[in-house]
Amino acid sequence: MTTPPTGTVSASPSTSRLNRAAGGTANYLDERTSIGAFTKFMARKIFPDHWSFMLGEIALYSFVVLLLSGVILTAFFVPSMDIVHYEGGLEQLKGQEMSKAFESTVHMSFEVPGGLLMRQIHHWAALIFTASIVTHMARIFFTGAFRKPRELNWLVGFTLMIMSLAAGFTGYSLPDDVLSGNGLRIIDGVIKSIPLIGEYISYGLFGGEFPGEVLIPRMFTAHILLIPGIILALVALHLFLVFLHKHTQYPGPGRTDKNVVGLPLFPVYTAKAGGFFFVVFGVIALLGAVFQINPVWNYGPYDPSPVSAGTQPDWYMLFIDGGLRIMPGLFEVVIGGYTLSLNVLIPAVVLPGLFFGFLALYPWIEAWATGDRGEKHVLDRPRNAPVRTGLGVALITFYVVLVLEGSNDIVANLFRLSINDLTIMFRFAVFLLPIAAFWITKRIAMGLQRKDHELVLHGAETGRIVRFESGEYIEVHEPLTDEERWVLVSYENLKPHEFGVETNDFGVRRKGARWRRFKTAWSRFYFEDRVEPVTPAELAEAHEHHAAEVEAKKNAEPRDHGASHA
Amino acid sequence: MSTDNGSIASETHGSGVADGEFVDPGVPAAHRPRRADVDPKAARKAEVQVAAMFGVSILGTVLAIYGYVTSDASGDDLAAVQRTTMLMGIGICLAMLGVGVGAIHWAKTLMRDHDMVEERHALRSSDEARAGAIEKLKDGATDSGVGVGRRGLLKGSVLAALLIAPLSVLVPAVGNLGGDWNVSNFKHTMWRKGTRLTKDPDGTPIKASDVTIGSVFHVIPEGLNELEHGKIEEKAKAVVLLVRLDPRDLNIQPGREDWSFDGIIAYSKICTHVGCPVALYEQQTHHLLCPCHQSTFDVANGAKVIFGPAKRPLPQLPIMVDDEGYIVAKDDFNEPIGPSFWERLK
Amino acid sequence: MRRLSLTRYHRAAPLVLLFVLLAGITTAASFVQAQPANAEAAATVTDISEGSKLFAANCATCHGLSAQGQDGVAPSLVGVGAAAVDFQVGTGRMPMQASGPQAPSKPVQFNDEQTQQLAAYVASLGAGPSVPDAAAVDPAKGDASHGMELFRTNCAMCHGSVGGGGALSQGKYAPSLMETTPTHIYEAMLVGPQSMPVFNNANITPEDKRDIISFLDEQRNGAAGGLSLGTIGPVAEGLWAWLLGMGLIVGFTVWIGVRSS
């Protein structure tokens, strides 16, 4: 029990020494941590192989890049709003009054070799982080990976998404420049509009009137300690749940709700996923090397008076900015001497609340339509869930319209349009386009389902034309292999669910009848329009029909010119 | 590690049917080998490619360090900063991509690539485990001296204490965030009767004769630059725009006949929407455009909102000319400037 | 050799020398004045008459034969000064080809001489700002830092933080300043063309104007961080993060997932 296991005896003595060292280390650890059992459990864990499963990893790896570059930045950034005069080398800032936060940012950009690179890597990584979270969330949504047992993990991921917005916002506000400072002013205006307590929240956050002297240090603490701490804890929980539930897989031959088909963690995913970290890092470094981002020395130190054309927040906040721009100003009311600014509250508080609330609760919202079902580990192809896919595209359309409105002065300047006309157009589009997008997407999905249906029944077109003696041409269709066909017929064909009778045996209305009626109607909304998968009976009938048709054509008499076609 | 999932492996088409339903044909047994699986030369080639990728990575590291060592840190040469950024950045990019692409290429060409199968176990704990858990919890409840459904006083009081205890820390912590909590500061600015209007940011006073038709002056109150404390906070409320219109174009609002003169008129620069500086003055249309959310104010008509998400007109600063010809304020604004808040009118 | 000796000691030499001396002293005196001289370009009578011909042929249709303007069509040019003409004609904005929210800059229709003649003619109609001399617009003489402070208070809201341009309402725009000459920048500030307000010399003094020119000149040295993405700001950065950043990375994921040959 105490002798370390000896390695295999081989020709070269160094190998056996290495083996003995490795064995010794493993034994030392195992006697203290049970790492042997864990290794047995973990090392050859199977993960399915599809590129869309790596989108979450982009978020994870860009977060690691953020942590690494962020630590380097903290060595140079001074989170203080004390006023200093610029004494560095940059001509255009010479002698100007600025906060230490701004000055340290410019100093590290111009007088620390590689400092600007680190800042740019950090900021590009933040943009990639938030973009990959949204992409990953979209993949989860459209493939139905949030269904039981993963609803809780969906909530964890949703919270991570919110945290990433907070991290980004506090981060780009730290340099205390005119652009982010005006963003903070806008947020202060939004906070002040909150009824009853808004002024006090504003005064409390800024430690007095805007901008105060404590905001940058407070945001710094949030940005480097509180928010990353919460993110790390949630990421650990998120990954733990993925390992516990095992990864989902796309439908295919041999893939069921009771297995996972794929490749082992060690060595394949150690190499692929580990290598992918370096790829993400490398691409972010490329962006940071070549493309300038957030040139705060051009915006200038924050002062409440200047503002520049093209005042936008980072992309992930644009939808809120777009909401603020798109809202007409009429909706501010005074009730009993108190001012209720609905023109600010609706786009900045109510709208994101509803949008994010819907997203967060979506697993349950969809579960209302499907009724209680078992564990789902095989993903949906998006076409096989037309209403869900349509809803997702509608939400994305809504989001994109707001993002475009948030960029309206850029769009107007680039394309020589009128910002006023753009805004009016988007006011209509924000309602009409999502509805149109839902309807079009649903119909496209069902069209694709019908195409699959045809593929199963008639096989794939080969492009080979055969001419019979009778003069008739047909195109040869290749029947699908069993594997191909299985993917197209094995999808879950959910039907509208009846959620129970309204009255009991004595004719008395049961409690909760209205809720069940709603769920029944909701289920109809989801599953009424559907394309049934092909059954073997239909396939056999199609084959007979084909065979008969081909026979008939083969044996047909050669046709005369001008003879009518039967 | 393969499991038998009960499917009928089929070699011919059309036989994957049982009981009138299609059956799962199972994980394909046939495996298409890669070139490196069958041809040792191809495997060797892949190995060399992977090693070359790792070699590129090493070169990248060298490039990054070279860029660092040869950088110019005086800060006044934009081109030098650009060069350092580019060299170090491309170096880091190659260093990372080399490792990543090498590892992935290794996995794709040389590592195992045919599928394995692992069983899932239901997440739901077995009935025995559940029963055991309930037993243990019941035992624990008995041991706690409380039992199930007894001793409500104990349960109620521990809950109350636990919920309320955090307040002992939270109340002072949150209470200290706001300093003096004097939110009435929002309602006043530093403009007073007789305060001269001066140019932003220098602070030189403005004579009425300086303000010609079509010009716009960005204004701060005299004395702002000399403030020792709270300078930015006061500036954030006190900035003003001073413009001159042809008097024939100006519709003076009732009750404000003496707040402007000869077409010279002053408005708060802080937008009544959410607080950005409204700074874009379009001389020919007399419109003030805010760049943040495109609220547009008509200077010729009391700075009323004519487009965009703002609701209220910009507050007007009443001004007059003193004996030396300088423009001075007659009073503070008659309402709080900037965005609305709940008690704005109280 | 003979020609040189013949002209060396011309009888009129002392008179010519005296004239040159007087002219030199006068010119020097005009430079000694407190303000940097907006030197009057010596407008000769020929310039004005040639200018009036050009004006009648190219400008009078809209601005009227005596430049009095037409309501709703074109403003009066009496008193706009040589600077306004030099700016509008020198950037190609005038003659305006088609009506629209504003006159865009386009290929210049007149050469320098003709522009000067038009300017001389309009200046003769009524006193107005004149074309600045080289010293007044020399970036090397300005303080870029002070220029930046002035620019971000007075100009950046329309023209962008480094003069990249920006949108105004109803389809109007503040153009990019990246290619504009120092003289035209000075003149635009002084004159306030179209939607741009007038920044007279009491508001932004001639030294201030030169400082702003110096700051804008600094911006033409390129971006310290690499490619500037149009100086548009976070919108461009977000677009590139999605298109290029996510595009490349997702491209890699597809490569990772695809079976090797």
Image (cartoon, coloured by chain):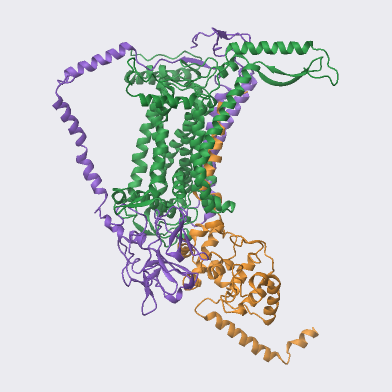
Q: Which chain: green?
A: A
The answer to whether one can see residue B54 in this image is: no
Judged left or right of residue A224, residue A420 is right
- Residue B150 locus on image (x, y percent): 15, 21
Indicate the colour of chain C. orange
- Relative to A367, say whether B264 is above or below: below
Query: In the image shown, does A399 or C254 lie closer to the viewer?
Result: A399
- Residue B328 locus on image (x, y percent): 36, 72
- Residue C243 locus on image (x, y percent): 55, 40
- Relative to C256, say whether B337 is above or below: below
Query: In the image shown, does A227 or A479 lie closer to the viewer?
Result: A479
Q: Which chain: purple?
A: B
Query: In the image shown, does B308 or C231 lie closer to the viewer?
Result: B308
The answer to whether one can see residue B261 in this image is: yes
Q: Which residue is drawn at 64% across and 22% down?
A: B42
The C terminus of chain A appears in which quarter of the rendering?
top right
Judged left or right of residue A32, residue B20 is right
- Residue B331 locus on image (x, y percent): 32, 69
Q: Which residue is drawn at 49% across and 66% down?
A: C143
The N terminus of chain A appears in which quarter of the rendering?
top left
